[in-house]
Amino acid sequence: MKTIRITGIFSVLLTLFVQDLTAQTQTSTALTVEEIVNEFLLGEGVEAFNVTIYGGFDADITNPRIGSFTSFGTGFPIEEGMVMTTKNVQIVTCGPGVDGSGPTVDPDLSQLLGGGPQLHDVTVVEFDFIPSGDSLKFNYIFSSREYNAFVCSGFNDVFGFFLSGPGITGPFTGEAENIALLPDGNFVSINNVNNGSPGPCTNPQTGEICPCNADLFVDQGDNTGNQSQSDVCFGGYTVPLTAEALVQCGEVYHIKLVIANVADGIRDSGVFFEKGSFSSNLIVDLNVNPVVPGFELGENDFIDGIVAGCTNAQFCLFRPDTMGTDTTFFDLSGSAIPGVHYIEPDQNFVVFPPGVDTVCVDIISLATGLGSQVDSLIISAVTINVCGDTVTASASIPIFNEYTFPVVTTDVTID
C-alpha cells in the first residue's frame, strides 16, 4: 500500500461512486407525534405548542398513523418529512393497513364534503403556533389507493388543513378556513384531482362528471389502486402543493390537519408533508457548500468541507419574498482566520434586486501548511422580521488544512 498526501494543488484525484440501486421509501413511527411535528414538519419562523391527536389526546406518544418518511432516490417529489395516513403508515410501502382504531366523525371534513357519505379512519393532528412573519405556508402531497378505479365516485377520500386565529373568519369550527386548496379554489380530494383530461371528465364506470385538474396528478398505478412504480404504494398522488395563508406576526393560531376515508374503510389514503416547510416568512435563510473548480467530482466527494488551497466554498442567502429590494448583512466567524484560511469578501452584505430570491457569495480558500488541523468557517446572516425581532440564520463548513487518503496500487514491471 502507498499513501499519497496532498496539501496544495491536487496531483491525484480519486472519485468514488457509491450508488444505491435499491432505493425505496421508508417510514418510521419510532418518535412521538409531538417529536415528529417538531422535527419533520416545522421550519423557520414558527413556534408550536399544545400538539394533540384525535381531538385532544396528548401527542407525547407514538401513533401508527402518524410518522416520518424518507424517499431519497426513489423519484417521489418530496424526499423527507411527516406523513399521515388513514391506516398505519406501513401502507406507504405496501404494508398491511391493520390499524382500524380512531374516530369515524369530523365535523369539518363532513362540512367540506357537504354532508353525505360516512367517514372512516379519521386521523387528526392539531397544534397551536406563533408565526414570526405575516404569512404561513407549507408543502404537501395527497395520495390514495382509491386511484384510479374510484375517481368521481362516492369513495371520495378527503383531507383538510383547518386554520383559525386572528384575522381569519372561515366557515369551519372556530371560524377556521381550509387552506388545502387547488388553484381553481376546490378542496383537494379524489374527485377533484385525477387522471382525466383537463376540465370536466367522466368516470367510465358511473358516467359521473367531475373536475380533473389532471396537470396536478401523477398516475402511479392501475385501476386496482395498486402501485406500479417504485416510490410509494398508492394508485396516484398529486404533484407537490402549497398551503398558505396570511397571518399576524406574534399572534397565536391553531391548525388542524385531518384526513379520512370516505364511504368505506378499505382503500386508504395519505398526506405527505415536506420536512421543514411549515414556516412563516423568515426574511433570510442560507446554506454553504464546497465548490471544486476545474474538477468533475462524484456526488458525495468532498461534500463535507473545504480543502485549503484546493477547493473553495459558496454560501447562498435566500429570501421567500421577491418583492422589492432587500439588503442583508452577514458575518464570518469560527476558528478559520481571514487572510490565512480564506480571502475575506470585499463587502459584508448582499443586495436582493426585485424578483431575485437567491444571492451567493464565493469564499476562496488559501493553502495554510498547518498540517492535519481542521478549522471551522461559520456564516451568519442577520435580518429584522416583520415583528421587529432580530433573526439570525447561520451555517458552517469545516476547512481541512491537509487532506489525506489511501491509494492502493499494484507493482508495475517495465522491461
Image (cartoon, helix red, strand yellow):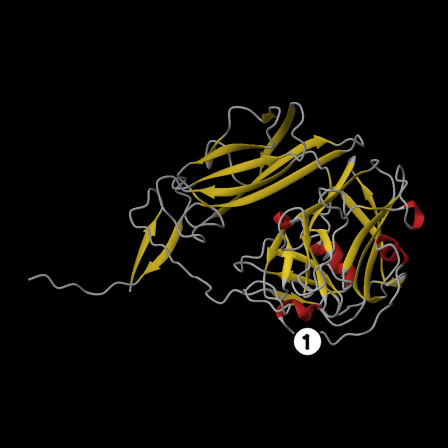
* Residues packed near mark 1 inside 10 Å, few (<14), some (14 to 19) or many (20 plus): few
Q: Is residue 179 above or below residue 284?
A: below
- Given the image, on which type of amino acid does mark 1 rest? Pro
Residue 303 or residue 278, whichever sits in front: 278
Residue 23 or residue 31, whichever sits in front: 23
Count every numbered label the image shows and give the total: 1
Tell me the residue at 40%/52% (across/down): 298
Quarter of the C terminus within the rendering: bottom left
Question: Is residue 334 in sight in this rendering?
Answer: no
Q: Is residue 376 left or right of residue 164?
A: left
Name the element at disc 1: loop
Q: Is residue 338 left or right of residue 80?
A: left
Question: Is residue 148 in sight in this rendering?
Answer: yes
- Disc 1: which residue: 96
Tell me the residue at 67%/46% (across/down): 199
Tell me the residue at 90%/40% (across/down): 169
The residue sitting at the front extreme is 207
Q: Is residue 158 left or right of residue 336?
A: right
Residue 11 or residue 294, whichever sits in front: 294
Q: Position of residue 351 (x, y in %)?
A: 60, 24
Quarter of the N terminus within the rendering: bottom left
Q: Position of residue 72 (x, y in %)?
A: 55, 58
Residue 185 or residue 366, whichever sits in front: 185
Specify the quadrant of the image occupied by residue 92: bottom right
Q: Is residue 341 left or right of residue 100?
A: left
